[in-house]
Amino acid sequence: MRLFFAASALGLLAAAPAPAPSKDQTPTDIVNAAPVAAWRAIPADDLMLIDFEGGGQAIVQLAPDFAPVHVANIRAFARGGYWTGATVYRVQDNYVTQWGTNDDKKGFPAGVVAKPPREYERPVRGLAPVSLPYPDSYAARVGYWHGWPLAWDPRRGMANLTHCYGMVGVGRDLYPDTGAAGELYTVIGQATRQLDRNIALAGRVVEGMTLLSALPRGTEALGMYKEGTVARRIVRVRLASELPTHERPSFEYLDERSPSFAAYVAKRANRKDAFYEVPIGGVDLCNAPVPVRRTPAQAAR
């Protein structure tokens, strides 16, 4: 059983030339009005499709720029059919949903690195994150890079993905184990930021999150299901790039350097529309998630 336990050029959202949103606009209104040029495509090889027994599919965007060995393992697991017949066996309220084989004795497919390095953070050098202009309790600086929620420490020169809702991480045993990525989890409650820099984050759920979050909670320790019972069974896991082009799902994210994104974050921090009376004057990283959507052509089908 693998469980997890508990100096670059920077942009600044506050200084971005954001269009002045009208008083009654909501963040969703701003995202829906964003021009085509404000969106960036997600590569098909970074999309993993999880099909569940009885119907339904969750789609995960992988993060090879932050956990390259773990992501390579995930791709090898998917191509090797490792998760066929695997299950969702842990659903812990306000914490995580976890899936995999829950079997330490099952052999790995060819190409899997059994003991990956500690891919919990990477050098910030080479990135150009856009900084969120509000304080964060867990990191010196936070913001976004290529659509990902990012934290970094300018003094150490290191950056890491953050445990926001829907992020996907690698289950592991006690330190120094790093997990091979055969067991994965997603955050289904309040952001578990205390796990940042302690576990490899390898992606995020971009579609089908309710199939993982809206499940009966496990009744055993750590949200585990009773022996012989599971929350969901997995029929198959595939990479979008392995499908015929016309069958591939296609997603894009709102570019954090676009005026539309700056306006969206400003509105998240200062709601003043038909529902809100008092603008709060700030927002944390996980409460201003990067908008992701199916490409308009697919959404219209």
Image (cartoon, rainbow, N blue to C red):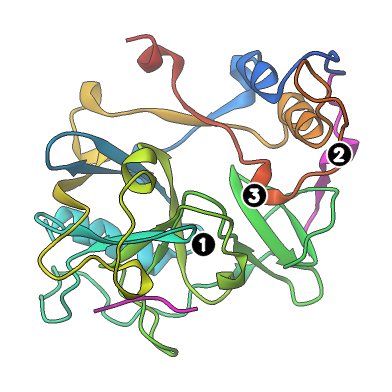
Residue 66, percent across and down? 51, 62
- Dot placed on the residue nearer the N-terminal end, 2 or 3: 2
- Dot placed on the residue nearer the N-terminal end, 1 or 3: 1
Residue 94, percent across and down? 49, 57
Q: Name the residue type under label 1.
A: Phe
Whether pointer 2 and pointer 1 mark residues with C-beta atoms closer than 8 Å, the reply is no
Q: Is the C terminus in the top left, top right, bottom left or bottom right quadrant?
A: top left
Q: Which mark is residue 66?
A: 1
Label 2 residue SS: loop
The segment highlighted magenta reads: 1-19
Q: Residue furthest front?
A: 219
Task: Report whether 49 appears left or right of 230.
Answer: right
Mark 2–mark 1 distance (CA, rounded to whole Å): 33 Å
Task: Report whether 8 appears left or right of 28.
Answer: right
Label 1 residue SS: loop
Q: Which mark is residue 280?
A: 2
Q: Tell me if residue 214 comes above or below residue 20 in the rendering.
A: below
Residue 256, percent across and down? 69, 37
Q: Tell me if residue 51 comes above or below residue 190 in the rendering.
A: above
State which quadrant residue 35 falls in.
top right
Q: Name the residue type under label 3.
A: Cys
Residue at image position (31%, 28%) is: 249
- Dot placed on the residue nearer the N-terminal end, 2 or 1: 1
Name the main secondary structure of what is drawn in magenta. loop
Query: How many numbered marks appear?
Result: 3
Q: Is residue 51 visible?
A: yes
Task: Report the residue marked by disc 3.
Answer: 286
